[in-house]
């Protein structure tokens, strides 16, 4: 089931430092980021094996999720929020602000056979 992790952040007069260390439920094999998105919807799939961790470094976006039991909407609007998406989580990203940078860590290398595009039955 998808869930939010609150990342440890250190703040002082110089700014903020957020740490992603020993909190992800997987070893990172792939990192990608999404930016410059218009009003398009991204994602629209789940995975066979891959676990993902999404962090909105700048701006905001909404990730809708369905794990075939629960449907949820998560707003990522702070770089100290990390959304964990399990393989069974059919998700899509939308409502990107113009300045959004969404970074995603993945537990597996890219392979097209890992993607399942069919939605769960309603």
Image: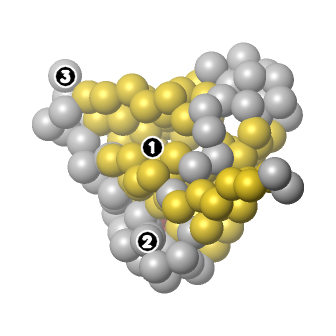
**Residue at left offset 31%, top offset 29%:** 72
Question: Relative to 99, is 31 on the left or the right?
Answer: left
Q: Secondary structure at mark 2?
A: loop
Tell me the distance, in whole angstroms, between the alpha carbons under discs 3 and 1: 15 Å
**Residue at left offset 71%, top offset 46%:** 57
Query: Which of label 1 and label 2 is nearer to you?
Result: 2
Tell me the distance, in whole angstroms, between the alpha carbons under discs 1 and 2: 24 Å
Question: Relative to 98, is 115 on the left or the right?
Answer: left
Rendered image: mark on residue 70: none
Rendered image: mark on residue 23: 2
Nearest the eye: 53 or 41: 53
Rendered image: mark on residue 45: 1
Rendered-image quadrant of the C terminus: top left
The part of the image, by quadrant, that contains residue 86 is bottom left
Question: Relative to 46, is 54 on the left or the right?
Answer: right
The answer to which of marks 3 and 2 sits earlier in the sequence is 2
Question: Relative to 23, is 119 on the left or the right?
Answer: left
At label 2, counting other C-alpha atoms closer than 10 Å, the crowd grade (few under 14, some 14-19, many 20 or more) is few
């Amino acid at each position: 089931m998808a869930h939010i992790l609150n990342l440890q952040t250190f703040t002082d007069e110089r700014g903020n430092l957020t740490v992603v260390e020993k909190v992800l439920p997987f070893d990172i094999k792939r990192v990608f980021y999404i930016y410059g998105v218009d009003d398009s919807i991204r994602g629209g799939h789940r995975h066979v094996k891959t676990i993902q961790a999404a962090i909105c470094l700048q701006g905001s976006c909404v990730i809708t999720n369905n794990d075939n039991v629960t449907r949820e909407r998560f707003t990522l609007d702070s770089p100290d929020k990390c959304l964990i998406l399990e393989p069974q989580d059919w998700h899509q990203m939308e409502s990107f602000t113009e300045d959004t940078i969404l970074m995603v860590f993945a537990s597996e290398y890219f392979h097209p056979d890992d993607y399942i595009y069919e939605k769960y039955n309603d």
